[in-house]
Image (cartoon, rainbow, N blue to C red):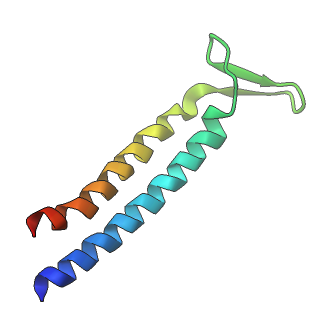
Amino acid sequence: MNLLSSKKVMTAASILFECVSAVFFYLWHELYLRWDFNELGRYFDPETGAVYTNSASILCVPAFVFLMLGAAAFLYPRRRG
């Protein structure tokens, strides 16, 4: 009985981690991947006159960390049997 509830908790944690990962991947795409940065790491938007830097690339770190945590939370109770 305890093992069954443990699997449910870990599956719920896995879903939560994957959702948080998806949010960070979306932010990474919107704030970093869609711009074409020059060799100095800057993008000039001619419509708004704003200059964007490539500092948003750090958002890939929590995206991949939560992705791995979600995979581990999903696979761990299944390995234990």
Height in image: 66 above or below 53?
below
Residue 31 pos. (x, y %): 64, 39
Residue at (18, 61) in percent of width and height: 76
Q: Quadrant of the N terminus?
A: bottom left
> Going by the picture, which residue comes out furthest to the right?
47
Determine the residue located farthest toward the bottom in the rendered image: 1
The residue shown at (32%, 49%) is 68
| Nearer-the-camera pick, 51 or 5 | 5
Left or right: residue 56 versus residue 9 is right
Q: Residue at x 59, y 46 (%)?
A: 27
Q: Is residue 38 above or below residue 26?
A: above
Locate residue 26 relative to residue 19 in the image: left or right. Answer: right
What is the quadrant of residue 45 in the picture?
Answer: top right
**Total numbered labels placed on residues in the image:** 0
25 lies left or right of 75:
right
Q: Nearer the viewer, residue 32 or 53?
A: 32
Q: Residue at x 26, y 62 (%)?
A: 73
**Residue 37 placement (x, y as % from top left):** 67, 20
List the single residue furthest toward the top: 39
Q: Which image quadrant for residue 80? A: bottom left
Q: In the rendered view, would you say 58 is above or below 68? A: above
Q: Quarter holding the C terminus? A: bottom left
- Residue 20, position as x, y percentages in the image: 46, 58
Give how far across and how far down residue 19 sits, in percent.
47, 61
